[in-house]
Every structure is written in structure tokens, then in C-alpha cells.
Amino acid sequence: MSLNQIKISLYSLFLTHKFGLKLKKVSDAVEATKLRLEYAETLLSRLNISVEVEGAEKIDQGGQYLIISNHRSIIDPLIVEIALKHKNVNSLWVAKKELYNSFFFGTFTRNAGSILLDRDSKQMSSFFKDIKTNVTQGYSICVFPEGTRNKNETPLSDFKEGSQIIAMKNRLQILPVFIKANTNAILMEAIKNNTKDLKVTIEIGDLIDYKDRSRTLEETYKQRFSL
């Protein structure tokens, strides 16, 4: 690992813990959203990664959604946060247990506004109850329907069924977003060659009706983005 890579890794660790501790002191949803956005913009700026948003006008001001995105890299949530900028959408991320216990991300994940998903649990009722409680309070829910990072050459992995269940149980319109790049490759390039300006484009798709069962959510998502 080069000196530059070590510097970026240490800075990322410092920034993640710094904002995690800041968020621990915040109980207001609007303030938490602002801090998460500030974190996203600060870290991506340090990595020289810019984000271009296509179709932001499709997001209603103050809208409440189930937001679904493809997933290749640990920076994907930051890109989605930037896509929601200035839209007054206060959202919570569904986060797996491993992130809660992570040395790197644990403090941030626990405090940034997230709903714990324990995939080893035999009882999912508490998870769906947490979702319902937060939706009732006006939050949107963000989830990666693939369930984990896609490390394949294909643009999309198979969707898990949980996303559609969340939308139906909570009557949430589904806002599909598609990150039009292999963000893991871009992140590796940014760490390796930090002087190079890189760009990621995220596209906002047309809403998907949670009541639409004419095709699977995965099929509809692929149709929205011509995948």
C-alpha cells in the first residue's frame, strides 16, 4: 500500500468516526440528513469523485418513498444521499448487522439513522415493526434490493424479495435509482490515483407503484433503466 493510499484510508476512518460522533448528538431528522449529506460530499470531494444526478425533478419535495438502488461499492449510500439533496427527503438506511459491528463503519452506522437487518435471525417481525414505526413518523426507507454488493460483471444481481414486501406493507411508492458506473472500480482508482478527477452519474427513474404486481420488482427496475 502506497503512502497516499494510507493517508486516504486514515482520513476516511477519521472522517467517518467524526461524523458518527456528531450524529450521536443529533435527534432531529432534518439535522441528521444534513450531516449525512455533509459527510458524503466531504469524503467524495477528498477522493476527487463528483456526482452528476439525472432526473432529480422526479423526486417530490418532502416525498416519502422506498428508495431502491443497485449496489457495487461502500460509497453507494453517499451517492444516493447526494441524489436526494435539497429534496427534504428524510430517509433511513436498512443496514446489515455486520455494519453495526464494523470498526470502520460501526459508529457512523449506529448513529446516522439506520434500521438493523439481522439476516441470521429466524424472526423478522421486529425488523418489519421498526420499518412500520419509522414510516409512520414520516421517514423514507433506503435499501439495496440485491442484498449485498454486486461483485459480478453483470450490471445487476438478483433482487431479494424483502424490498417489495416493505413497500407493500407500508404503502410506499418505490423510487428507483441507478448508479451508472462500477463504483467499486472508481473507488479503487480514486484511492490509487487521487489526483485524477472522476465522475459518477446516478439516474432517477419513474416511480414504481407498490400495488403493481404485473411483474417482479427486479423486472420493473430493469425496464426503468433498460438493463
Image (cartoon, helix red, strand yellow):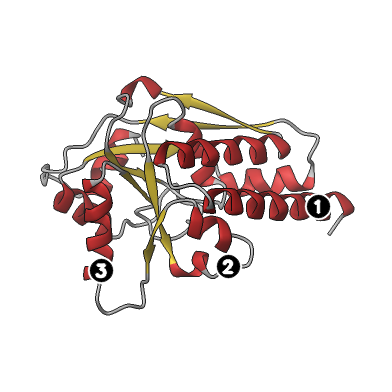
Q: Nearer the viewer, mark 2 or mark 3?
A: 3
Mark 1 or mark 3, earlier in chain: 1
Q: Which residue sits at x=44%, y=47%?
A: 27
Q: Which residue sits at x=36%, y=72%?
A: 119
Which secondary structure, mark 1?
helix
Q: Nearer the viewer, mark 1 or mark 3?
A: 3
Q: Mark number for residue 102?
A: 2
**Residue 173 left/right relative to 191:** left
Would you place residue 15 above or below residue 33 in this image? Answer: below
Mark 2 or mark 1, earlier in chain: 1
Badge 1 crowding class, 10 Å Cα cut-off, few under 14, some 14 to 19, many 20 or more, is some
Question: In which quadrant will I find the N terminus?
Answer: bottom right
- Residue assigned mark 1: 5
**Residue 175 left/right relative to 35:** left
The amino acid beneath tag 3 is Ser
Query: x, y (%) of residue 89?
Result: 36, 34
Which secondary structure, mark 3?
helix
The amino acid beneath tag 1 is Gln
| Whether residue 80 can be seen here | no
Q: Quarter-wise, where is residue 182 in the image?
A: top right
**Residue 112 left/right relative to 146:** right
Label pair 2/3, CB-CB below 8 angstroms = no
Q: Which residue sits at x=28%, y=51%?
A: 134
Which secondary structure, mark 2?
loop
Mark 2 or mark 3, earlier in chain: 2
The amino acid beneath tag 2 is Ser
Question: In which quadrant will I find the C terminus?
Answer: top left
Q: Which residue sits at x=47%, y=38%?
A: 31
- Residue assigned mark 3: 126
